[in-house]
Image (cartoon, rainbow, N blue to C red):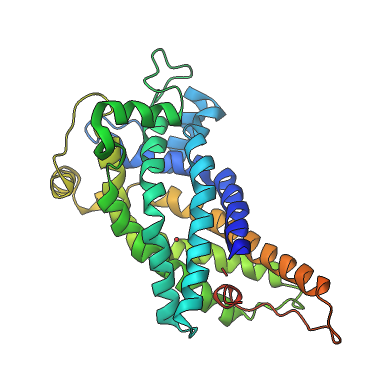
Amino acid sequence: MALDFAAGCIGGAAGVLVGHPFDTVKVRLQVQNVDKPLYRGTFHCFQSIVRQESMLGLYKGIGSPMMGLTFINAIVFGVQGNAMRHLGNDTPLNQFLAGAAAGAIQCVICCPMELAKTRMQMQGTGEKKSKKKMYKNSLDCLVRIYKREGFRGINRGMVTTLVRETPGFGVYFLAYDVLTRSLGCEPEDPYMIPKLLFAGGMSGIASWLSTYPVDVIKSRLQADGVGGVNKYSSIMDCVRQSVQKEGYRVFTRGLTSTLLRAFPVNATTFATVTLFLMYMRREEECSMPTSEPQPVQLQPLQQQTQPTSM
């Protein structure tokens, strides 16, 4: 299980660096005022942030996921691997259940982390140098929210996070399992790494598509109150107001940037985790005195978690 956690840490850090700019674009599009929109779409948002706030604007709030996602991925891959060992049989249903369990448990860290990330990403919108910063950094953001709103404040959006992450991670691991089996990822295959990247990227896309409408509501709830005024009194009130003003299309806001981010981030994460585990297990087998060397086989990620692992 220690290897699962270590692999998750490495994969998480790699994923954050690759995908954070697209996440900033996603959040801006999800929560912008529909009456006075600043951005016309994904690429206009991307260009506007770079022009008005410099390239650093795309990395606002990266401190929170750099700290949090590393641990989140460690928890996710560790819990998923441990759950598969307890469930025993490697079946699609068990893959989904193990992933869902991992997704639910990591919400304890994910929710406050994403709250801080969202608030930091919205801070100083359209300004190269913010005249007045409400938060110095992600930690300061959480401390201030806690002082003002208490424990409930730093867990704003917890229910929507749970609703998004639990089935989302179930789909995530299930899709990766199905794809790696279908593609036949084996160590001797010269196209193994491209296959792993493709399987990981498509798993991320499948996971996001399965729960994206919930993510829109989560982002709006967590960004609510930034200017000192709360627009939404509850999850259903947020859904009702959003649909009344923008129609059902509101649930696809920011989807393009999310999918553009999902493929490289999850391709990087899953390929990094799988290759790291292969390397470490090969090292372990080489260091063990055996009369006959055993061949190292790449099995789908969930099977690796049983002696590993949106």
Image side of residue 292 versus residue 130, left or right? right
Image side of residue 284 versus residue 91, left or right? right
Q: Is residue 267 above or below residue 121?
A: below
Q: Is residue 60 above or below residue 173?
A: above
Give the percent coordinates (x, y) of residue 130: 43, 17
Q: Residue visible at 49% across and 76% down?
A: 84
Q: Residue visible at 45% across and 61% down?
A: 310
Residue 210 image-quadrant placement: bottom left
Work out which quarter of the rendered image holds the N terminus and state it: bottom right
- What is the total number of numbered labels drawn onto the structure image? 0
Residue situated in front as seen by the camera: 41 or 94? 94
Give the percent coordinates (x, y) of residue 21: 51, 40
Outermost residue, front direction?
289
Q: Is residue 226 above or below residue 265?
A: above
Residue 167 image-quadrant placement: bottom left
Residue 283 image-quadrant placement: bottom right
Give the percent coordinates (x, y) of residue 278: 70, 69
